[in-house]
Image (tube, grey):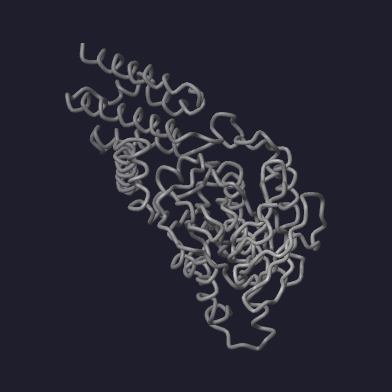
Amino acid sequence: MKVKVGDRLEGGQIYATLPETPIIEHRLMVHPELSGVVTKVMPDGDYKLFDTVVVIKDNEGTEHNLTLCQKWPIRTSRPVKNRLTSSVPLITGQRVIDTLFPIAKGGTAAIPGGFGTGKTMTQHQLAKWCDADIIIYVGCGERGNEMSQVLEEFSELIDPKSQRPMTDRTVLIANTSNMPVAAREASIYTGITLGEYYRDMGYHVAMMADSTSRWAEALREISGRLEEMPAEEGFPAYLPSRLAEFYERGGRADVLSGGEGSVTLIGAVSPQGSDFSEPVTQNTKRFTRCFWALDKALAYSRHYPAINWMQSYSEYFNDLDPWFKENLGEDFVEYRNRISALLQEESSLMEIVKLIGSDVLPDDQKLVIETARVIRVGFLQQNAFHADDTFVPLEKQKLMMKTILHLYKKAKEIVAKEIPLSKVLNLGLFDKLTKMKYDIPNSKPEMFDDYIKEIDEKLASLLK
């Protein structure tokens, strides 16, 4: 118990705590719309869910019993003291996300992709490794075996922060494709309300909605049964406003209980036939600030996460760059911009290569294509089953970019002196860098200095 008789309690204040799991403390809060003076407090001990532990009297003299739970309508957002800007990144350990398309704590992101592109696997990776305190995973209209896989995997996986099973900080909401349509429609709201509840306790929550397309289909089915006028592709006319209401409930805030909490929303979208012009994907783009577009061609070539770097974007750069500069140095943002520019340049060059072949390109443009290959295979592609590659700290991500760009800069100088690019490629440096994600453990960043030294020495030998 955290209060005594005579204390005045306002809405959202904590009156008791209890261990929910070995790593999560459940904080019992006064209903946000209730306040009053404590008239009775029960002693510490064991209680059931609906047992009264505190009694408060409001200003009208009415007594209210406070129990170990709280009722709240799932379609109504819970109040906060003050909403904060999105200035702290949600660190996921996935290079393509943290470096090229970062998301903020309290941010919103969409993962659209056709069947088999890895939406669920990408969300699993984020759920396992992102630095949120609590994960809420909503399986809305998904296959039952996927939910059972999550349950099995998370119970076996050890949380890196607490060394406890992941299930100790994960809430699973299962509304599989064979469940009633009304339950599927409500599942997303159940998840976000739980997220807000834990946010109000002062936790950082990440919610994975898999998938919002199935939720929209349930909405369409209910709308059809109500004989409402259909809009585009049979979806109800209020689909955009419902999506907006859902994504706007994310955010970082000063909470009523004191302290800070956040709810980060990551929604998978399953457009039929990978058609990103369909209504759910297009409306989701309007209300989210991160768009991680999954590419069928990348997935089929075993490039995971299959996030297409040309179609994806993040609008959080301006908010998060001060944090990156303060914690990782000015050069982190510079490296990211140069990596992005090389990928853009490669995309343009590949259009020429498709038409007339690569032989006609000058050596400096061939060098761009070779460097971009190292970025794609050695940096953006990540192995979820490799101990060092499944989660990569930001410091290592920065050093990997630095090493790749150092090789590009030095090789460009060599090519400018009219030494053939083939001689540079024969040194094997490019192939070595594609494997550095496996060869350099996360705990030994000093090994990057040896790589840079080797690059300098081998390229210098070509000038002799």
Residue 25 percent location from the top left of the image:
67, 47
Q: Which residue is located at x 30 percent, y 36 percent?
A: 331
Q: From the viewer's perspective, is residue 174 above or below residue 432?
A: below
The part of the image, by quadrant, that contains residue 229 is: bottom right
The part of the image, by quadrant, that contains residue 58 is: bottom right
Q: Which residue is located at x 52 percent, y 44 percent?
A: 305
Q: From the viewer's perspective, is residue 429 above or below residue 190?
A: above
Residue 446 percent location from the top left of the image:
41, 20
Q: How many marks?
A: 0
Q: From the viewer's perspective, is residue 89 above or below residue 257?
A: above
Locate residue 372 relative to residue 192 in the image: left or right.
left
Residue 176 shows in the view: no
Residue 70 percent location from the top left of the image:
70, 65
Residue 273 percent location from the top left of the image:
56, 63
Q: Residue furthest left?
A: 417
Locate residue 417 relative to residue 425 in the image: left or right.
left
Locate residue 237 relative to residue 89 in the image: left or right.
right
Q: Which residue is located at x 55 percent, y 29 percent?
A: 388
Residue 345 shows in the view: yes
The part of the image, by quadrant, that contains residue 452 is: top left
Q: Which residue is located at x 81 percent, y 61 percent?
A: 51
